[in-house]
Image: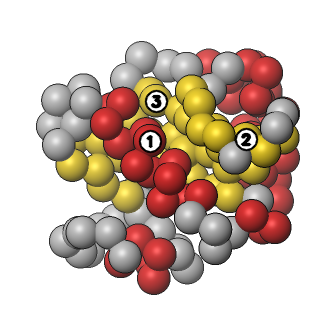
Amino acid sequence: MSITTYTRDHLAGIVALCEAENWPSFGADPDRAHAVLTAPGVTTVVALDGDLVIGFAYALSDGHVAAYLSMMAVHERYRRKGIGRDLIDYVFPLTGAQRMDLVTGDAGAFYRSFEHRTFEGFRIYPG
C-alpha cells in the first residue's frame, strides 16, 4: 500500500469508492469531480494497492489555521488495516493547517482515536 497525491488517473477509483458509500455527487459528473478534487485550497490524496485506489481523503484548507476533512473513504476489504489513519496523517500536513475539523456519521469511534475535541455542529443545505 502506498499513499500519493491525487491525479486524474485516480478519478474512476475515487468515484467507485463514493458510489460504494452511496455518495452520488462525484459519479454524477466526473469532470466536476476532478475540478473539485483539484480546486484551490483543496488537498486530495489516495491510497493505492498497486494501481487500485483503495482509499482517499479530500480536505479543504485556508493553508494556515483551519482545514476541513470533507470526505474520506477506504474500500470495505481494506478497512481496519490503518489506511484511514495513514490517509489523515498524510493529508493533514499537506493542508498547512494547525487543526482539522470534520463531520461524521457512523465512524465516530474511529475519529475518537485521534487527539481531538468534540463540538456539536450543523450542516446546512440550500432550500
Q: Which residue is mark 3?
A: 43
Which of disc 2 and disc 1 is earlier in sequence? 2
What residue is shown at x 73% (from left), y 41% (from top)?
48
The answer to the question of whether label 3 and label 1 lie on touching residues, with beta carbons closer than 8 A, is no
> Which x, y percent locates residue 33?
68, 29
Left of 121 or right of it: where is 102? right
For the residue pair 76 and 58, the one nearer the viewer reads as: 76
Q: Is residue 103 visible?
A: yes
Tell me how far mark 2 sits from mark 3, CA to CA. 16 Å
Q: Earlier in the sequence, mark 3 or mark 1?
A: 3
Residue at 79 percent across and 21 percent down: it is 9
Which residue corresponds to the image point at 69% horizontal and 69% vertical from the top-left? Answer: 79
Q: Amino acid at mark 3?
A: Thr
Q: Identify the residue shown where x is 62% and y is 26%.
A: 6
Mark 3 nearby-residue class (10 Å; few <14, some 14–19, many ≥20): many
The image's colouring method is secondary structure
